[in-house]
Image (tube, rainbow, N blue to C red):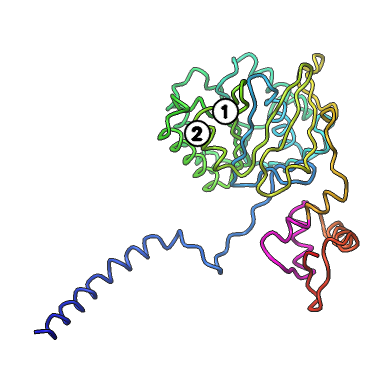
Amino acid sequence: MENKKKAIEALNAIRQLPKVNSIINKYEPFRITSSSNYPTLPPIIKLADECIGSAGEIVTVSGVQKSGKSAFLNTCMVASLSQNKLDSVPPEISVEYCNGKAILHIDTEQPKPKHLRNLKNIAMRIGQTELPENFHSYNVKSMERREVQELLEKICPELISKYGGIHMIILDGAADLINDVNDADASNELVKLLMKIADEYKALILAVVHKNPNDGKVRGHLGSELLRKQDAGVAMKKTDTYCYLVAEDLRNGGSHLVPQLKFEFDKYLGYHVCTGLHEGEYKPTKADKLKGLAIHLFKLTTELSYTDLCKAIMNHTNTGMPNAKAKCRDLVNGGLIQKLENLNYALV
């Protein structure tokens, strides 16, 4: 009798195996192993050599009302549309050229005449009378909120098909895609959609969120959820006479190494121009930047070969091999990294 009972138990256990395997097989595409191949995606926006956002990531751009968020957004769009260095783009802001890929701009707040003036200014800043065809800008102020979500979700596959990729998505007014920023379910659903779009299409998303003027915190559950899921966050702050840029949370760089650029509205030009640094701001020294670079290079490993070290420097600084070798020498001479007996390099 006892043997029969054990046999039945063994048979039942065997019958359960296909169910276990089916679950394993079902979620196999989501499994990450040490041999998985996920190449590092290139940085799209850098501030003073610190990575702000790469392909497939979400960056929040926050600030109170009328704090000059468009100054940063418009500068990024201008820089992404030109292969040349432009006088209207400060040298501290580096944006990867779109190279024909789509740029999607969705504005939920501006009146159409002001929206049009902004676009004409962007075209003028890149030396053109018309914006290129791959730049898609939509004014959705009169749309229903759910309809804006549908636009965002459904237009991306067509942009991929037409232009071979999406370089950047600028969502100027994330809160206007849901009815209530304090609705946890709606907020979570929207953030999940943004993460899905960024990951699936390898597009950098710049999402604008507003801050409360009284306490400086982002508004509602939506703002909090975006901060939790963002890859980086920058904020625009304002004084009585100008606004300035602050890097608040960088996963792939050092916030303290990013200069607080000052922007002032030029009535003659019709847009915000960078006029220097925020008063009283500490400007990082070369030693500070080298220290930040060293920490970044060895964040995920304890040792690197010379070749891998140079490749990592090239990837982070978006420069060539000669510059990487020079940086390597500076890191060694500065006492930040050392050459080991096995000829690899490590932090001091």
Can you tell which quarter of the image residue 295 is in?
bottom right
Residue occupying image coordinates x 57% and y 64%: 37
Distance between the Cα atoms at labels 2 and 1? 8 Å
Give the image location of residue 276, x and y in percent.
85, 29
Mark positioned earlier in the residue sequence (2 or 1): 1
Q: Quadrant of the C terminus?
A: bottom right
Majority secondary structure in the magenta region: helix
Q: Which residues are magenta?
A: 294-318
Is residue 329 found left or right of 202 in the rendered image?
right
SS category of the residue bearing label 1? strand
Direction from residue 99 to residue 1 in the image, left or right = left
Specify few, some or many for label 1: CA neighbours under 10 Å numbering under 14, 14-19, or 20 or more.
many
What amino acid is found at the position of numbered circle 1 in the picture?
A: Ile
- In front: 35, or 188? 188
Q: How many marks?
A: 2
Q: Which mark is residue 152?
A: 2
Picture residue at 59% right of the left edge, 39% below the top: 205
Which image quarter is the N terminus in? bottom left
Q: Residue 57: horizontal and vertical position, in percent?
A: 60, 45
Q: Is residue 316 magenta?
A: yes
Residue 169, above or below 182:
below
Q: Can the viewer see residue 299? A: yes
Q: Are marks 2 and 1 in contact (CB under 8 Å)?
A: yes
Mark 1 — residue? 106
Give the image quarter of residue 5.
bottom left
